[in-house]
Amino acid sequence: MSHSTTTVQPSHPTPLDDELTALMLQLEELGLFSQTRKGKHAIDRPPDHEVAFANFQAELQGYKTTLNDHKLAQSIGAAVHSDGVLISDLTDQEVKSCADRRMALEMSNNDPEIETPPRSTHVDIQDDMETISRSIAAASVIEFSDDETEAGPSMTYTERQAETMRKLSMEFQCCACTDRYSRAFMITATCSHRYCLDCIKDLFMRSTKDEGLYPPKCCRQHISVATVSKHMDPDQLAAFELATVEYATRNRTYCNNYACSMFIVPGNIEPGTERATCSKCGTHTCATCKNGYHYNTDCPDDPSLLQTRELARGMGWQTCYACDRVVQLRSGCNHMTCLCKAEFCYVCGARWKECNCQAADPNRIEERAEEIVERDAPLNLPPAERRRQVRQVFAELQENHECEHSRRFQRITFGAPRGGFRCELCDARHYKYILQCRHCYVNVCEDCRRNRI
């Protein structure tokens, strides 16, 4: 069994030690002074100078306690910084020892030769150790990235300590839920938006159900799973990893048991027989037609799927070349971006910019302009004014049919219909406000603007 060792570095006096020494000497002098100054007075009516002296002595004692706390905090921070690897190794060894002991207790409980086995424990020591380790790590990581960068006047040691404590207690607003949290319990995205731990984990979990949110991002910049994984429990992390495999699989197979519908990883599909086994409920699915497995009969390709594709061709819909998902054009631009991130031409289905088709369909642009005016125009709008607005929106859409939306949104708080504002990306309803692109007039909610487009 290997043992970890650490070298204890010799301690050097610090300004904090000097201040503590001076304070202790002052308290000793005050103690001697108080013993020689005892006078005769009523117990419940001491003179004013005695009360002032006692208050001053108590104040110095409290300041001494504060300095000792600061010294302890510095010592803990230095230990975590310099011996982080060693602490992690020791923690792992402790967790392993606890697990071995728990296994030994369980084995002894099941041994019939032991007359009175020791009582089994159900305390999950590993979870407690991990919680403590994560709390220490979160509290020991201090970022001052958004502090002032300009050099200011020099500060005394006491002022520097006060400034450090102020930064540690500083709170920031979560951009998703708008509640305030200390920086140790927040994640900062690359775009500088801050999320509380619950909201960032919720974004990652929603991305496992909504491919449009995968990979999780803010302001078009991806959020690394490494920055969030240490705050996710094993089930959440496993669900996200499974979604990563699912979204990377082109011809996906899902469990045909409607009560389950679990994604079946390619590794659970037998080559040759195409029998896909669900790891959750054990149901067998045909990986060819996606229905129940046929066992001793050949697979007739799914007739409902063939009918759907035939309908899509008749309606002029297009199929994504990367994932075979059927998509419908909602605006005039023929540049399609599928949920799987593949980009293709809506007219011919080829990869984008690899064909000679028009970039946009004027008829669809005009339909979109009429839809926007109908959505935003007030009631009883005169026909002439309505036509004028349609022409104006049509001209702007022709120029901006490939709008990328970056920082071009305005907040619309008035004119909401009875059912509230509708996000045109996720179809959710909002009653306070909606965000509208100044160039292409698309209406989106705050979450979709930040995490989806």
Image: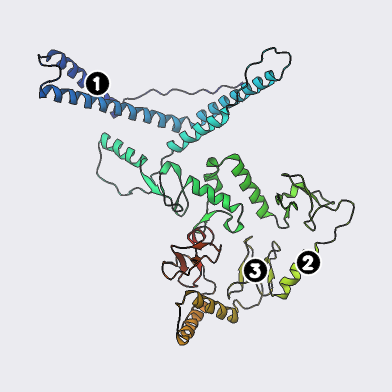
With respect to residue 419, does 202 lie above or below? above
The answer to which of marks 1 and 2 sits earlier in the sequence is 1
Look at label 3 and name its amino acid: Phe
Look at label 1 and name its amino acid: Met
- Label 3 Cα neighbours within 10 Å, binned few <14 / some 14-19 / many ≥20: many
The answer to which of marks 3 and 1 sits earlier in the sequence is 1
- Label 1 Cα neighbours within 10 Å, binned few <14 / some 14-19 / many ≥20: some
Is disc 1 placed on a helix, strand or loop?
A: helix
Q: Which residue lies at the image location 61% right of the left edge and 53% below the top edge? A: 209
User: Residue 169: which disc?
Assistant: none
User: Residue 306: which disc?
Assistant: 2
Is disc 3 placed on a helix, strand or loop?
A: strand
Query: Residue 173: image x %, image y %?
Result: 40, 50
Q: Mark 1 points at which residue?
A: 24
Residue 30 as seen in the image, left or right of residue 310: left
Q: Which residue lies at the image location 69% right of the left edge and 21% below the top edge? A: 107
The answer to whether residue 268 is seen in the rendering is: yes
Query: Residue 141: image x %, image y %?
Result: 44, 39
Q: Which residue lies at the image location 53% right of the left edge and 79% below the top edge? A: 370
Q: Mark 3 points at which residue?
A: 344
Q: Are marks 3 and 1 in contact (CB under 8 Å)?
A: no
Query: Residue 48: image x %, image y %?
Result: 10, 24
